[in-house]
Amino acid sequence: MAEKSEKAAFETFQLFSSSSSDDNSQFRFGFLDSSQTSLPPPPLPTCVEVPLTEVSSSVRYTVEPVNLNGFTLLKGRVNTQEVFALSNSDLVPGKYEGGLKLWEGSLDLVKALRSEVQNGLLSFQGKRVLEIGCGHGLPGILACLEGAAVVHFQDFNAEVLQCLTIPNVTANFSDKSSDLATNATEVRFFAGDWSEIHQLLPHACDNEKEEACMTGQSTAGYDIILMAETVYSISSLPTLYELIKKTICRPHGVVYMAAKKYYFGVGGGSRHFLSVVAKDGIMVSSLVAEVTDGSSNVREVWKFSFK
């Protein structure tokens, strides 16, 4: 049945599809000036920490509820044109990586995490959590609400954090009658490329600690790493996996990943990332959830842990 679903998805659906409530326009995976001669990649943005108070006042932000099987979170909506001077359907590698869209995988991940918590398979209480490629940040927000000690949000673009992630976090705490500033959870936001951001993340293994981290003899690292729709590009998978190894707590740290099984036209997908992990040989994977609702490509949620 899964094979038939994949064929149908290949014939019917576009490479990506955002949550239907998020944008009336269809997302097309297009590069600007694709017909022109390839240019060198743009320089990587500087890795920075974005303060909680650094919220854009020039971009209109509206908030709306998202119902997730009886559990409601708030998510914002902003205009890509206002933030990046791009149309809502543009993805520009090296400049904008789609963080203003609410992708289905983010919702899948929240649902899967809640199920894991309810079934006693996962606890955020007192844990250090990192959400990679956070965008709206809904999985990380769930971790905050579930009592995590630390939740750090990472996105490629500082603008995404300023215009969307931080307002979303604030809105969800306000809705729960809890002041984010006085909450026990340490919430911080970091922007930058996966190849460099570990140098800024407080709980990553730096060079001096690296050997201890790799052997599980260090208290550094994040207990839980969350990521959704981050494995669409094959070329970025090794860098993403290296970031995970540099930031995860050993030997008990876990990773939860939500992604489409295959991203047709680009070559990435959950199965390609699984092969990267399997080739390294230090982590095991288990399928947490599979979504074949007919609305898009087959989607999956995977859990990774150390052998």
Image: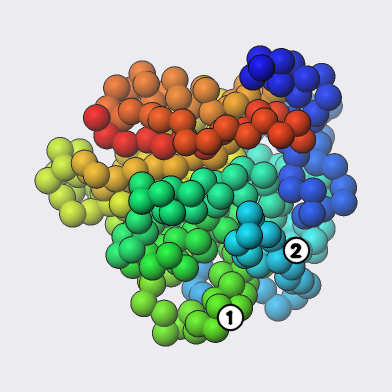
Q: Secondary structure at mark 2?
A: strand
* Quadrant for the C terminus in the image: top left
Count neighbours of disc 2 (C-alpha within 10 A) and say few if under 14, some if 14 to 19, many if 20 or more: some
Q: Is residue 44 left or right of residue 262?
A: left
The quadrant of the rendering that contains the N terminus is top right
Residue 218 numbered mark, or none: none
Q: Which residue is mark 1?
A: 174
Q: Which of the colour schemes (rainbow, by chain, secondary structure, one colour) is used?
A: rainbow
Examine the rendering and report whether any part of residue 32 can be seen.
Answer: no
| Residue type for callout 2 | Arg
Q: Nearer the viewer, residue 268 or 40?
A: 268
Q: Which mark is residue 77?
A: 2
**Residue at the (69%, 61%) spot, across then down:** 66
Label 1 sits on a secondary structure element that is: helix
Count of numbered marks: 2
Residue at 64% in and 19% down: 2
Q: Is residue 216 left or right of residue 287?
A: left
Ranked by sequence position, the earlier of labels 2 and 1 is: 2
Task: State the image quarter where residue 163 is shown.
Answer: bottom right
Q: Give whichever of 34, 37 is nearer the camera.
A: 34
Q: Which-is-in-front pick, marks 2 and 1?
A: 1
Q: Is residue 70 visible?
A: yes
Q: Amino acid at mark 1?
A: Ser
CA gap, disc 2 to disc 1? Answer: 17 Å
Please tell me whether residue 306 is drawn above or below residue 218 in the rendered image.
Answer: above
- Residue 91 lies, in percent from the top left, at 73, 42
